[in-house]
Image (cartoon, rainbow, N blue to C red):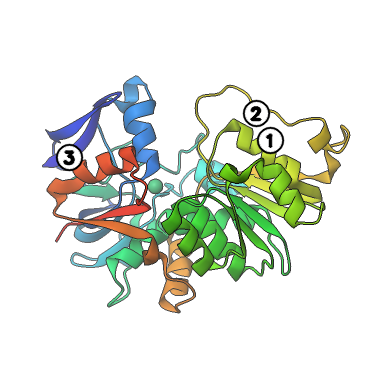
Amino acid sequence: MKAYVRHSMGVVGWMEKPDPVCGPDEVICRPLALCPCSSDVHTAWEMDGAWLKDITLGHEVIGQVIEAGKDVKDFKVGDKVIVPCTTPTWKHPDIQDGDPWDAGGMFAGINFSNYEDGVMAEKFKVRSADMNLCHLPEGMPYEKAIMVVDMMTTGFHGCELANVRYGDTVVVFGIGPVGLMAIAGAKLMGAAQLIGIGTRPNCVKIAKEYGATDIISYKDGDVVEQIMKITNGRGVDVAIVAGGDAETLGQAYMVTRCGGAMTNLNVITGTNEFKFTYASCGGGFMGHKTVNGGLCPGGRRRAERLTAMVQADRLDPSLMVTHTFHGLDSIGEALQLMKDKPRDLIKPIVICD
Ligand SMILES: [Zn+2]
């Protein structure tokens, strides 16, 4: 079969690979729709390691089951499925410690294109199928469903980690697709003042549609000063980082009120240290601020819950789709677009059938 792979750092392309072999609790799918992600760009162009040689890229996909293992109960050949990008084995004792996503090692729940082949191929394998897959509801457009697998679960997770409450003032640093989903999630969880930080006009427009009450641009001056000004010097209850760099973490910590929470959803590269200033630490005592962060929760129930929200029209995540490609062959072009990040890009999608 054909697979789109990372040959070596910065070198990507198609290659022939053997068909994946279906284990007893696994399924083999063909992709119906795929989305390239910034994480694919990190894997292909920024990460290095022998284990990544010729690894198939991709982790955001809607698929159709073409083979099911003998132990799979709830999914059969022909079923259309939403495939979370995080698919733990659900068979590791670390899960009993309460963090399935990192059970067996950091990021071990995200095996696609990290530890095993990803989904940008004519066929891909999903492990622990009954525990990880979610049926695609009849009639739900791929553009909506595919946002469940990473963008929604990741953006919403920032709100969960920071425990957004009714009436909270929330700031979201970065209004790319994850930040936009953090804004939508914060609104659904009851945020009152909801501040987005970004400049791209189409992102600003959608941020407002998802519930942002204020937009701040770094082009208008120091963002910390701007946030403190519009919160009357109090700072925010919750700061969610969904873009920027190591410095952004320091800014988020600074604007979080004493007793508040900040959380990071962004893959921060290019630094070895994060710095919090003495002033932001409440004079050295850390000000009872909670700091958290993590990768996107996956698994079947999570996907079913988020899909139910889309079905109930609580939000329309397909507003973020700005570029549509047709045919699996266009995956390289779509991934390159994700790397180049033209100003009007939020999320590209490849429709395979
Ligand atoms: Zn992704």
Q: Amino acid at mark 2?
A: Phe
The answer to whether residue 291 is visible is: no
Q: Nearer the viewer, residue 121 or 205?
A: 205
On the image, which quarter does residue 62 sit in? bottom left
Whether the residue carrying mark 3 lies under 8 Å from ligand 1 is answered with no
Mark 2 falls on what kind of element?
loop
The reply to whether dot 2 and dot 1 touch (C-beta < 8 Å) is yes
Q: Amino acid at mark 3?
A: Ala
Kindly identify which residue carries mark 3: 3
Mark 1 falls on what kind of element?
helix
Horizontally, is 118 left or right of 283 in the view? left
Kindly identify which residue carries mark 2: 274
Whether the residue carrying mark 2 lies under 8 Å from ligand 1 is answered with no
Q: Which sits earlier in the primary sequence, circle 3 or circle 1?
A: 3
Against 46, residue 24 (above or below) is below
Whole-angstrom CA distance, mark 3 to mark 2, is 37 Å
The reply to whether dot 3 and dot 1 touch (C-beta < 8 Å) is no
Q: Which sits earlier in the primary sequence, circle 3 or circle 2?
A: 3
| Outermost residue, front side | 220
Whole-angstrom CA distance, mark 3 to mark 1, is 40 Å
The x, y position of residue 73, in whole percent, is 32, 65
Kindly identify which residue carries mark 1: 250
**Which quarter of the rendering shows the N terminus?**
top left
Mark whose residue sits in front, 3 or 2 = 2
Number of numbered markers: 3
